[in-house]
Image (cartoon, rainbow, N blue to C red):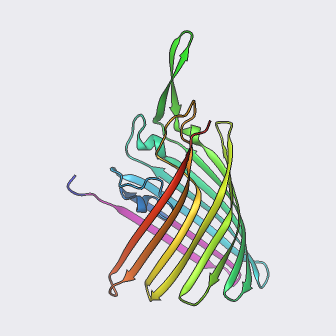
Amino acid sequence: HKADHTHQADLKINHAFTEIYKLDVSDSFVVAQEPDLIDKGGPISRPLRTEGSNLRNTASANFTAGLTEKLSTVLGYSNTIYDYEQSGLGSLSSLLDRTEHMGTINLRWQALPSTIGIAGYQYGVTSYDSKNVLAIRANFTPGGIVFRDIHSDIRDSTSHYVYTGVDHSFTPQLNSSLRLGAQFTQYDNIDEDTASPYVDGSATWTYNPGSYVQLGVRHQRQATDIAFFNVDTPTLDQEASTVYLQLNHKITAKLTGSLLGQFQNASFNAGS
């Protein structure tokens, strides 16, 4: 086509019931080809521009409650839906159409005026819901070759994240955040469990109002558009390490420029 069209609609509501009870609700809906919009907020599962009017919707709610003067808890839930336009055998729809649920509980301790200690747990569910066939497997039997359809839900999984972390402000312009822990993943439709490190850290320097530089690193399991078969099991997901650097610069009062660089190294999990 001579022109591509991207649509993005964001909604945010923040409400403080009292000084210690707060609720944050947000929703982001995108129709796009660009992966930084489709997989906004984390390492992208497909690092190339993708043809088609692909859909992504992320809804989240977080409730913060103060328990004591220095201790508070955050209860959260997020839901992300991916729907790729390309259909058919082995299509992006069969590879990446899914719904992701994430429940979160964090304890936050105000250790110092500029330092918050965090202990948290997350429960994640990834459900592949494409009606397209992921692949066709040929099984050789004494009676001949039997072809079997492999559907995307073979990749369904649940994950438990356990981590500790810290949010620290070195100066009003320099802030950092770090989460360290482990991710335990169970695959619903095959007999396999796996454990891997979980890391999410970033440092942000605001050098001018509306202008900042952010350096970040993340390590976790995530979806992949690779489905190479090993024995009877396709590639289930990937364990990815990502380093990124983002520059956001306010050029004028009405014009802002953004630049993002990213490096990702992934190991694919092919089941058996």
Q: Is residue 63 left or right of residue 240?
A: right
Measured along the vertical axis of the image, is residue 183 above or below residue 18?
above
Residue 16 part of the magenta-drawn span: yes
Residue 157 part of the magenta-drawn span: no
- Residue extending farthest left: 2
Residue 224, percent from left and from top:
50, 48
Q: Is residue 132 left or right of residue 5?
A: right
Residue 53, percent from left and from top:
35, 52
- Work out whether residue 170 or residue 2 is closer to the camera in this orientation and state it: 170
Measured along the vertical axis of the image, is residue 127 above or below residue 203?
above
Residue 71, percent from left and from top:
76, 79
Going 69% across and 80% down the picture, which residue do you hit?
A: 116
Q: Specify the quadrant of the image occupied by residue 255.
A: bottom left
Image quarter of the C terminus: top right
Going 45% across and 68% down the picture, which residue do you hit?
A: 10
Q: Main secondary structure of the magenta part?
A: strand
Magenta residues span 4-27
Going 57% across and 34% down the picture, which residue do you hit?
A: 233
- Residue extending farthest right: 68
